[in-house]
Amino acid sequence: MEDEVTTLQDDIYDEGEDLAQASVAYGFTNKKDLADITRYIKEQFDKKLGVGWNVVIGKNYGAHVVHVTNNYIFVQFRQLYILIWKS
């Protein structure tokens, strides 16, 4: 399932990219709705990389966010886009 997660843009260390790949894949496999998936991804990032992470999941949106350097990743899973950043 991790092979379905495609990184589109990032400014993040390898550990963060690996965490994004794993938590997105796990969330979409084991959680029942988008709110639960979003919460799961945020909890994983907060627990493993420190608090302050934000997660947005959607099909068609634009965003401009200010993020902490090396703490931003934008990925795609099937037809959904996931923006993860620390501010």
Image: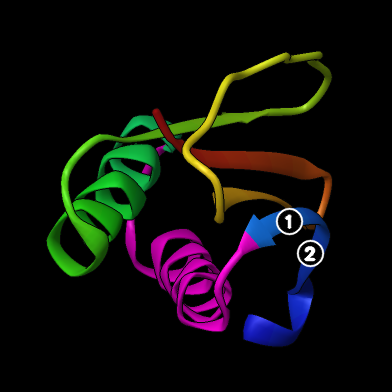
Instruction: Residue type at mark 1: give it.
Output: Asp
Is 25 in the magenta?
yes
Tell me the chief SS of the magenta region: helix
Assess whether residue 36 is covered by the magenta stretch: no
Q: Is residue 15 left or right of residue 74?
A: left
Image height of 83 relative to 63, above or below: below
Q: Is there any visible trace of residue 70 in the rendered image?
A: yes
Amino acid type for the residue under numbered disc 2: Thr
Q: According to the image, label 1 marks what residue?
A: 10
* Label 1 residue SS: strand
Q: Is residue 25 left or right of residue 47?
A: right
Q: Which residue is mark 2?
A: 7
The quadrant of the picture occupied by the N terminus is bottom right
Q: Which residues are magenta?
A: 12-33
Badge 1 local density, few (<14 within 10 Å), some, or many (20+)? some
Give residue 82's position: percent from left, percent from top: 63, 42
